[in-house]
Amino acid sequence: MPEVIDRPSKPNERSDKSKYKRILLKLSGEALTGEQDFGIDPKVLDRMALEIGQLVGIGVQVGIVIGGGNLFRGAALHAAGMERVTGDHMGMLATVMNALAMRDALERSNIRSRVMSAIPMSGVVEHYDRRTAIRYLTSGDVVIFSAGTGNPFFTTDSAACLRGIEIDANVVVKATKVDGVYDKDPVKHPEAVKYERLSYDDVLDQKLGVMDLTAICLVRDHDMPVRVFDMTKPGALLNLVVGGREGTLID
Ligand SMILES: Nc1ncnc2c1ncn2[C@@H]1O[C@H](COP(=O)(O)OP(=O)(O)O)[C@@H](O)[C@H]1O
Ligand SMILES: O=c1ccn([C@@H]2O[C@H](COP(=O)(O)OP(=O)(O)O)[C@@H](O)[C@H]2O)c(=O)[nH]1
């Protein structure tokens, strides 16, 4: 008999409070640095765990893709003289470290969670398997997808869009340091104007830098909506998931 992988389960019984049943949350590695210069700030992780716990509490299934930019980025290592593919491998391994730290924070908050890796790492984390991931999500576990896509020359934004499409999430939610997509980088241009809503083609045509263009092409081809919001704003994630107007919607 074929395996049933998408049956309703207890955690979803309360998802009527939420606009979405299943989300893919992209967390940037840099956000984990918090007040520090490098690495992982446990205080930031604890706050994120609290916010993710609120979603689980209303029955939302949460998949997470975590970046590695707080530790290593392939492009930066390459610019400093390292071979690019080696640099990208280091970047992907950095995302596994962040995922372990995130799982630790979630579990300290009594939120059941799993880490899967696109690169096999027996004894440390499970190897990514889509059907298993969907089973975990359906049973209410948070699933952290680490090691990006498993391939060099990609980013964790692309990994987030890829996993979001694969697990049939209702939306990809990108957590950043800015509160949405602007007509130009708001960090460099304080006069930049924020968009409430944009089409995929608007982002591509205007080359808006909030997400890499490979990722945008992928979500466009699969009609996967993306919401970009400010993770440093307390309560923003929950507000967005219950249908509040947070950040910018790309669809
Ligand atoms: N048009 C834009 N709208 C919003 N943010 C933008 C735009 N162009 C560039 N950015 C930058 O993109 C960053 C968000 O992307 P993110 O992936 O979280 O950061 P990083 O690439 O440093 O990991 C913001 O901090 C912002 O400075
Ligand atoms: O599918 C992937 C995802 C990530 N990376 C590498 O991992 C690094 C960390 O990811 P990213 O820069 O996307 O992290 P974030 O900006 O979200 O912290 C990247 O710079 C790449 O070097 C990769 O090679 N393939």
Image: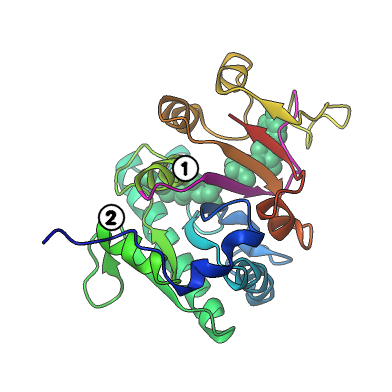
Is 57 covered by the magenta stretch? no
Kind of residue at disc 1: Ala
Q: Residue at x 60, y 46 (%)?
A: 174
Kind of residue at disc 2: Arg
Q: Is residue 80 visible?
A: yes
- Callout 2 secondary element: helix
List the residue tagged with mark 1: 80
Q: Residue at x 44, y 59 (%)?
A: 95
Coordinates of residue 219 in the picture (x, y in percent): 46, 32
**Callout in the foreground (2, 1):** 2
Q: Is residue 129 visible?
A: no
Coordinates of residue 18 in the picture (x, y in percent): 63, 57
Cα gap from disc 2 to disc 1, whole angstroms: 36 Å
Coordinates of residue 246 in the picture (x, y in percent): 75, 45
Instruction: Identify which residue, 113 or 157, lies in the foreground.
Output: 113
In the rendered image, the residue lying farthest to the left is 1
Instruction: Identify which residue, 153 or 208, lies in the foreground.
Output: 208
Question: Residue 192: which quarter of the image?
Answer: top right
- Callout 1 secondary element: loop
